[in-house]
Image (cartoon, grey):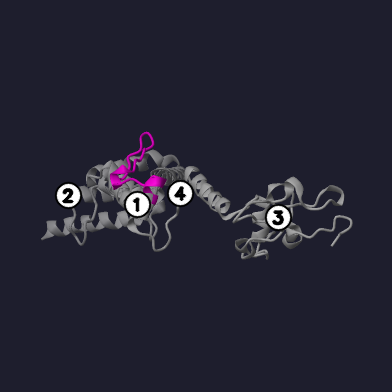
Amino acid sequence: MAFENGDVGGSAELLGGAAGGGDAGGGAAADGGAAGGDGAATGSDGAAAGESGTLPDWFEKVSADAGDGESSSNRDWLSAKGVKDLDGLVKMSRDTEKALRESGRIKVPGENAKPDELAAFHTAIGVPDKADGYEVQAPEGVQLDDAMIGALRESALKHGTPKGAFAGLVSDFVQIQIEQANAEAKRQDELASSWVKEQGGKADEQLAHINTAARSLGLSKTDMSGLRAGLGADRALGLLAKLGAGMAEDVLITGGSNRFGVSGAEAQGELERLKGDADFQAKNKPGTPERARWDRVNAQAAEFQAAKQA
């Protein structure tokens, strides 16, 4: 039968949108020309389209429908890639696998991965063989907690943490601690400064009382830092100032009537002196430190007088 206007049927019509020129198969010739010529896909035992224009069995089994999220079907994709036979398809697959291996990509183990797969993955991403393989660089002048760092190393190894990630994480953590410590030190400095200002003209005297208390109680620099951190700088200063003032008078009470460092005669003399101290008497109000001091001296003086009369 004769066809006019190049109306010759072939694989192009069966392939639909996949019909393209070149080696992939016969394409529609320019200006409405018939399929064929150099663009016709030829071959034996596996040709996508033979001289008869029919598809081989294996090609017909490839889906002609596009899947979810895909713009073309598997059949269209094969045609566009120029795959003419099964051997070409296998070669393309093997070449792709080789390219992936040589690209440096790492296979991420699944949930049920075998120990050797996990070990290979850990090695690839930089997990050390032992916990001491993790290196930590301490900031200059900073002493790290070796026990804590050791525990972190063990935890990092347990969870498959790369060396670089561990070093960065610990470095950031240490820096955060330093910043927090600096902020707290600044806050305590501000509390201490405010307390000193509140003492007015007696600031030096109060600081001397604090030093007296620290020496008498045998408090070290570490002890003093602990009081500052635990009580707050202002509260610690106030407490030690009161203790130091009492020690300076040798009337520190250690519970009940047990006193040390002051004789009855000295207590009597202190009582007489306080009676003539107008500034002290003006502050000698119930609930004040002056009243507590007054009561202590009076009690000791009274005991002294009672002992004399016994």
The circle drawn on residue 106 is 4
The circle drawn on residue 8 is none
Q: Tell me whether circle 3 and circle 1 mark residues in contact (CB < 8 Å).
A: no
Q: Circle 3 sits in a helix, a strand or a loop, which is it?
A: loop
Q: Which residue is drawn at 42% across and 57% down?
A: 109
The circle drawn on residue 263 is 2
Q: Is there any visible trace of residue 275 in the rendered image?
A: no
Q: What stretch is highlighted in magenta?
A: 121-145
**Distance between the alpha carbons at the discs numbered 4 and 2:** 85 Å
Give the residue type that dot 2 points to.
Ser
Of circles 3 and 1, which is in front? Answer: 3
Give the residue type that dot 4 points to.
Ile
Q: Nearer the viewer, residue 13 or 137?
A: 13
Q: Circle 4 sits in a helix, a strand or a loop, which is it?
A: loop
Label whose residue precedes the other's in the sequence (4 or 2): 4
Q: Which of 272 and 19 is in front in this view?
A: 19
What is the residue that sits farthest to the top in this orientation?
140
Q: Would you call the spot at circle 1 few (<14 residues within 10 Å), some (14-19), or many (20 or more)?
A: some
Q: Tell me whether circle 4 and circle 2 mark residues in contact (CB < 8 Å).
A: no
Q: Name the residue under label 3.
A: 51
Q: Would you call the spot at circle 4 few (<14 residues within 10 Å), some (14-19), or many (20 or more)?
A: few
Q: Would you call the spot at circle 3 few (<14 residues within 10 Å), some (14-19), or many (20 or more)?
A: few
Label whose residue precedes the other's in the sequence (3 or 1): 3
| Residue 233 rendering spot, x and y as whole percentages | 39, 48
Residue 67 horizontal side relative to residue 165, left or right: right
Q: Does the magenta stretch include residue 116?
A: no
